[in-house]
Amino acid sequence: MLQYVALPKLFMERRIPPASDRRVKSQSDRRGLTDLQTIFDWLYRNRVRKIRKVIVVDDGDIPHSDQAVEEALKQFEVDVWDWKKLDICSKTIFAAVRNAIEISLYSTGNNAVLMRWCSQNGLMKFPMGFERRERMDKYIDTFRRALEADRGNNPRIEVDVVFINNVCEPKQEFVKIAVIDDGIDASLENIDGKIACGVTYCPDAASTGLMNAYYVLSGTHGTTMACLICKICPKSRLYVARLEEYESAAGKRQITAKSAADAILWAVKCGVDVYLGAGPLRALRLSTPELGSITSNLCYPGQWGKCIRVGAATATGEKRTWVHGQDIDFLLPGKDILVDGTPPSYQSGSSLATAIASGLGALLLYCSRLVSQKGDTDLRNFSKMKGAFKVMSGGHNNQHPLVRNYFSPEFKASRWNMNSKRELSKVMKGVLVTTKGLG
């Protein structure tokens, strides 16, 4: 056993074919360097099996590839891992030193990487170490507070749903969400297992009598919407309807009214709780059209009066330029939203704000059922759900749901038990009490 292995930035040279006596610098390919594998392989050949602490400086212009890091260390038992590579993937760390009890991370501030590190499939996969759970929760809470210290009180919804993932209520129903759009990529990790069923109303233009499957995509819009919903409310089950599309004279994507109507009727028969749709039928998505101020803002069923109208806001709470302020009920984040995928990306648009609103509605519905003795609540009623959004809202014109004020860091980090259920009951009581009498 070695107490530690500490390696600075090394400049390794290797001999090229024996016929030549020249020395050349080690070359990197597109996957990055592999030099340090040679050193760790040498240690293994010399019967080293355990290293208490590994320290590697790997912050040059071309660092080692993830594969090289894994291959170098997976053959050893390592307690303390300190590989100075920026934004390293948590999967790489787990594959290399899955039994480590102390890990050092180095970040450029990339939010996608930070969110991956703190996800269920990130550092949560490692053993908890030697500290008691209460102390670990305290450490995690301190870490979260440090990350959020400079964010301020803006409308960005970043709901930590650890407590929901920990809920173990055998009789608790999932929230049924209809995603009426251009299909869903069912292979994505955060959607896998969440699709209850699907249907398609999209004929295959290249054949007669055949239909395009709901899991064979024409675009990524529906997948993006589903990812955001499942991120905010993991206890969701998706009912997917793929719509018939065509290209307008202006070259924009449009959907046919008949396919949208058929999809709505199908979703009603399925008994879904939340509707999320695409195209001009904006009430499904509870969203206003992305139209400029010179364009007519009349859009069915936005003027119907029986839907929650959502507009996109920036991180500072300002409405996006295309949003008609007088025609919306609430503003939710719709600029630079982190969307899971391969790779993760930042996207903007009113449809993102709508998906977030739908996810928040699903979260409230699930939480209210969780603490209700009847197993269901009145939040399926449009007016009462709108009232719940209003209760949670602040900012300009009270249009920004301030989720963090209700699902605080202390509550979010708790394990699911009777104490956390009581805390959740208090939260939901505060949200629901002022909706009484609405109908």
Image (spheres, rainbow, N blue to C red):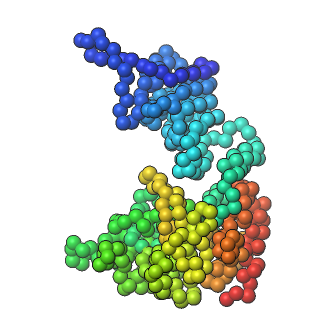
Judged from this view, the residue extending furthest toward the left is 207
Is 231 drawn above or below residue 101 in the view shown? Answer: below
Along the line of sight, the residue nearer the viewer: 131 or 259: 259
Q: Can residue 354 be seen? A: no
Q: Residue at x 57, y 45 (%)?
A: 109
Judging depth in this view, the residue of 98 and 204 nearest the camera is: 204
Picture coordinates of residue 293, whole percent (x, y): 49, 78
Residue at position x 48%, y 86% in the image: 298
Front in this rendered view, residue 161 or 399: 399
290, above or below 344, in the image: below
Depth order, front residue of 14/396: 396
Quarter of the image that includes the C terminus: bottom right
Q: Is residue 34 left or right of residue 437?
A: left
Q: Is residue 5 visible?
A: yes
Q: Position of residue 371 (x, y in %)?
A: 72, 71
Which quadrant of the view contains residue 331?
A: bottom right
- Residue at the front extreme? 294
**Figure disc tally:** 0
Which quarter shows the N terminus? top right
Q: To which quarter of the image does residue 157 belong? A: bottom right
Estimate the x, y position of residue 388 in percent, counting from the top left. 68, 77
